Amino acid sequence: MPVISVSQLNRYVKSLLEGDANLAAVHISGEISNFTHHYKSGHLYMSLKDEGAAVKAVMFKGHASKLAFRPEDGMRVIVKARVSLYENTGAYQIYIEEMQPDGVGALQIAYEQLKKRLAEEGLFDDGRKKPIPPYPTRVGVITSPTGAAVRDILNVLGRRFPLAQVVFHPVLVQGEGAAPSIADAIRRFNHSRAADVLIVGRGGGSIEDLWAFNEELVARAVAASEIPVISAVGHETDFTICDFVADLRAPTPSAAAELAVPDTRRLLAGLENAAVRLETACRGRLTAATQQLALLKNKRCLSAPQYYTEEQAMRLDYLTRRFAAAAQQQLGSADRRLAAQASKLDALSPLKVLGRGYAISYTSDGEVLDSVNRVAVGDDLQLRLADGVLSCHINEIQEGK
């Protein structure tokens, strides 16, 4: 019996597996476990298991990139795969070409996954939503040029607020390339600041028809828009990711147009009401002022102003007399106080003392002599009396009393 190598054995078994037509395209249901997304290569690695067994599986980037949802551990799926063997390890595994959720549709799962992820990032928070301008001068419309949505939007905008300029950017709204087309239109509007508010949407349809508005690319573009965005996708019961991210959701394209601009007729009616209220208020103020003027005209100061001036002149005379009397009283009191102070000063005057027989002696230098030690025998002195001055000559000095 010939001896073969391990490589030859694995290669032979692989050829047997790949040569079996029944294993070339099998549909397998199972639960995903040990899921790994190799981000550099884009390949997906996992195991599929049921209650009694498990098999390793790989899905290469070319097939994985076509998935509408993200596989996760615990997710039940149905796959189309071929059975083969990996020669390096001798492990038999399946190579997945197609995958779909077992039960709920792939698009519905992708929708729920993206909705949860963006909500966790805060893209749905009310705090980040921008207010819609009350009187926009330019309204941007991003939708299909052939659908009913654009006609409905233009009709409503023209009827409600013809003063606003409509800037229309046609895009694909379903099928391949729709999401990049919508996202690019939003970025273009923001780059050129071509509108004050954007309406992004389309008419109703199936989840497949509306799927472009559930793409992450569109959601990110709406969230990054500096221009407020009104989402108008489908009918009232349709909700897309774009609705949650937008600054305002409208149930229909027509409703979006109504939310984007004010109603000219209501504005004019409001102005008319304001004018009526203003006229009424002015008439009321004028009537009140007229009545006040009539009351003032009957006042005596206006009907007989001389009486008012005469009365004020009498009051002035009375006040003048009171002022003069008060001033005279104050002057008399001041005179009496001055006389009293003068009497006190006069009593202390040196002349009064001299009048009682006292004298003041001065040296020859004119200084007051207050001690015998300041003069000598032979010096001259002057004595100041009440009625004159005496010149004296010192013949003798006696100290002590």
Image (cartoon, rainbow, N blue to C red):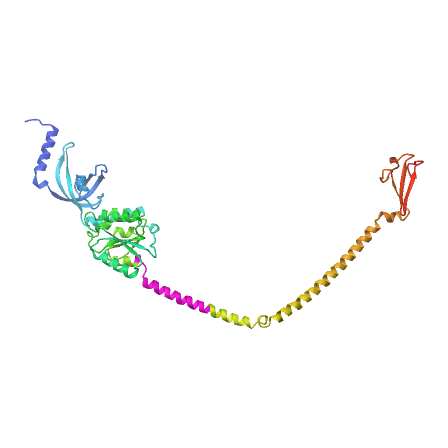
In terms of image quadrants, where is residue 206?
bottom left
Q: Is residue 252 visible?
A: no
- Picture coordinates of residue 268, whole percent (x, y): 34, 64
Q: Magenta segment: does it hold 170?
A: no
Q: Is residue 24 left or right of residue 162?
A: left
Q: Residue at x 55, y 72 (%)?
A: 297
Q: Give above or below for 202 relative to 303.
A: above
Q: Magenta segment: does it hold 283?
A: yes
Q: Is residue 213 left or right of residue 374?
A: left
Q: Residue at x 47, y 70 (%)?
A: 287
Judging depth in this view, the residue of 242 and 229 nearest the camera is 229
Q: Give above or below for 90 relative to 305.
A: above
Query: Which range of residues does the magenta coloring cover?
Result: 259-284
Main secondary structure of the magenta stretch: helix
Judging depth in this view, the residue of 215 and 368 nearest the camera is 368
Residue farthest along the left direction in this orientation:
1
